[in-house]
Amino acid sequence: MGKTRSAPTLNDVAREAGVSTATVSRCLNSPERVIETTRQRVLQAVESLGYTPNFAARVMAAKRSFTIGAIIPTMDNAIFARGLQAFQDELRERGYTLLVSSSAYDPEAEREQIRTLVARGADGLLLIGHERDPEIYDYLDRHQVPSLVAWSYAPEAKRPSVGFSNASAMRELADSVLAAGHRRVAMISGLTQGNDRALSRVEGVRQALHAAGLGEGALTLIETPYEIDKGAEAFRQLMALDPRPTVVMCGNDVLAAGALREAKGMGIAVPEQVSVTGFDDIELAGIVSPALTTVHVPHREMGRKAARELVAMVEGTSAGQPVCISTHVVARQSLAAPPDPS
Amino acid sequence: MGKTRSAPTLNDVAREAGVSTATVSRCLNSPERVIETTRQRVLQAVESLGYTPNFAARVMAAKRSFTIGAIIPTMDNAIFARGLQAFQDELRERGYTLLVSSSAYDPEAEREQIRTLVARGADGLLLIGHERDPEIYDYLDRHQVPSLVAWSYAPEAKRPSVGFSNASAMRELADSVLAAGHRRVAMISGLTQGNDRALSRVEGVRQALHAAGLGEGALTLIETPYEIDKGAEAFRQLMALDPRPTVVMCGNDVLAAGALREAKGMGIAVPEQVSVTGFDDIELAGIVSPALTTVHVPHREMGRKAARELVAMVEGTSAGQPVCISTHVVARQSLAAPPDPS
């Protein structure tokens, strides 16, 4: 099946509309040079014949495709779900449709998906994080497709971003961990390779330790993919250390949920024997027990603001203003003072 | 700024490639009628000029766009995440890129998104559930875009589906609920309006009650959106009933997580005072406490099989074979015998 079989051609459309193929081409390529009544006639012919790519119909109806693309690292957990849904809701209110692609944290996949979305006529792209091959940005510039970076705030970066400082956000949480009296700190981080958000969160923890006068040795770090099972596995490894860390700071709530699950399985009481913290404050954080002390990221606000800014860029009313979203620590039950040294 | 400003035209491409605009049009519309070397020259011109929609380039490179569209009801929780990621992984191995859109359970939004994906040249579409305006199927037929339905198995339906019987799956769980001795059964269902999966799950419960000789009155039903907070709210309402139901069967794990959260808040012990069950067996189900007794849906298997079948349909090697995925009940801690009548 598929549209490969005897799809109607430009000539069919021309015949149906009673115009020349040149006119149809003009409708496709410079609609402004074709009078409205003719455009409508061609548009109808395109529709009635089911001419595909009926991209044509859209191009004629408006020079913009009113389609926005977003490429996120994963659909496999809730990290991006909420912000993306809000991003889409706001786009829809403004007459744009969102098409989402997931790169599975693979730069090569992201590159393909960016090309696909541009090839499909996306008016603008939402990307997660700043770190990627500069060639991709050149490609987007060459095709005049505006792009906005979210989930990260870097006013100094070449691309406008709507997000927050992952380093400062995690630094604030690490400060409260230290304030609770912890000195043997472990961190289960997401893979930092190609993930500037993950790397900044580690830096946030390091900054806090450094400011507290603790040396490099004070931090035990494990990097692992953002999956519940991986968080559980890393937690088990950390609990095998002697001396044990008194707190396990996780790069996000998904890893923390895995750590809590493993703690339960190992019969280790959280927070009495070891404290665990998360990052993101996704719904999961309030449901696990003990409820997670974590960093609240206002995902919906970020998604909506990103949509407004990207649409403004697409419509040429903004060159791309960085927007900073503020996060805060949510204190629940998973962080307490360290146990008395025994 | 967007691609609206001075985008290169078909004429620019023709000039650059040293061919007539007619030849460029032919490359666009019936590439098989253009000799390879010419196609390549035009393709290069298209690329070097950054001619957009450079859809053209893809159409010339292959008559297929190698893009598959999927429209899911929501991105706001993990229900579809896992299956969709597997769907995409399988597509990628076969050289296709996935573009996802979320309808927020709004039929009108879904219709727009289907049109957008077809207009963007999608080779095929994955849709969730069978229930939608027949006009949409006519539209897809007219544009010769194959579509496959997932998350639901209905061999009798006009569209091929890859999924499971929501009714039988829930019926099996309801049978074990009755086997545990429960007679006052409540259900927190998702909104059944326009959601054939939700409706079938309710039917599954009714079938089990009927087979056990219990009348309509035995089931207290609340319908609410698939959100944790809504599940919590509905659970509170059910606990206010006198007599209380002894078990609360939830339409999915998200609602069940909300019910468990509310039970904890109300100081009601699960399963000692009331049992709670879920559906889907998303990761959440194993993390909440007590861990959820639920229906395991092999989301990854469903996603991969759906991808294989849809690609076969797009490539014309299959007319669309229904594929049935088997589910099973996972017994954890949230279901037990009802408390002794006091």
Image (cartoon, coloured by chain):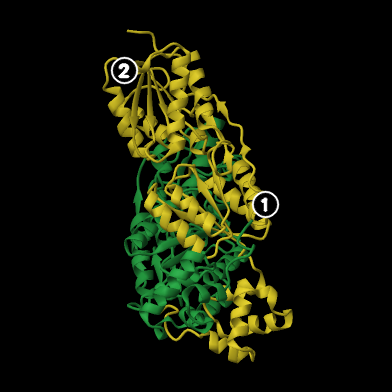
Chain colours: A green, B yellow
Name the foreground residue: B147 vs A138: B147
Instruction: Classify mark 2: helix, strand or loop.
Output: loop
Front position in the image: B277 or A185:
B277
Establish if A151 lies above or below A123: above
Residue kind at label 1, given as amino acid type: Ala
Q: Position of residue A135 (x, y in %)?
A: 58, 77
**Residue at position x 55%, y 27% from top?**
B330
Q: Is residue A279 visible from the viewing direction of this image?
A: no
In front: label 1 or label 2: 1
Q: Chain of mark 2?
A: B
Q: Nearer the viewer, residue B181 or B44?
A: B44
**Amino acid type at image mark 2:** Arg
Mark 2: few, some, or many residues within 10 Å (few <14, many ≥20)?
some
Please provide percent x and percent y for residue B268.
34, 22
Quick one: label 1 or label 2, which is nearer the N terminus? 2
Instruction: Describe the element under mark 1 as helix, strand or loop.
Output: helix
> Marks 1/2: CA distance?
51 Å
Q: Is residue B293 visible?
A: yes
Query: What residue is disc 2 on?
Result: B244
Residue under label 1? B312
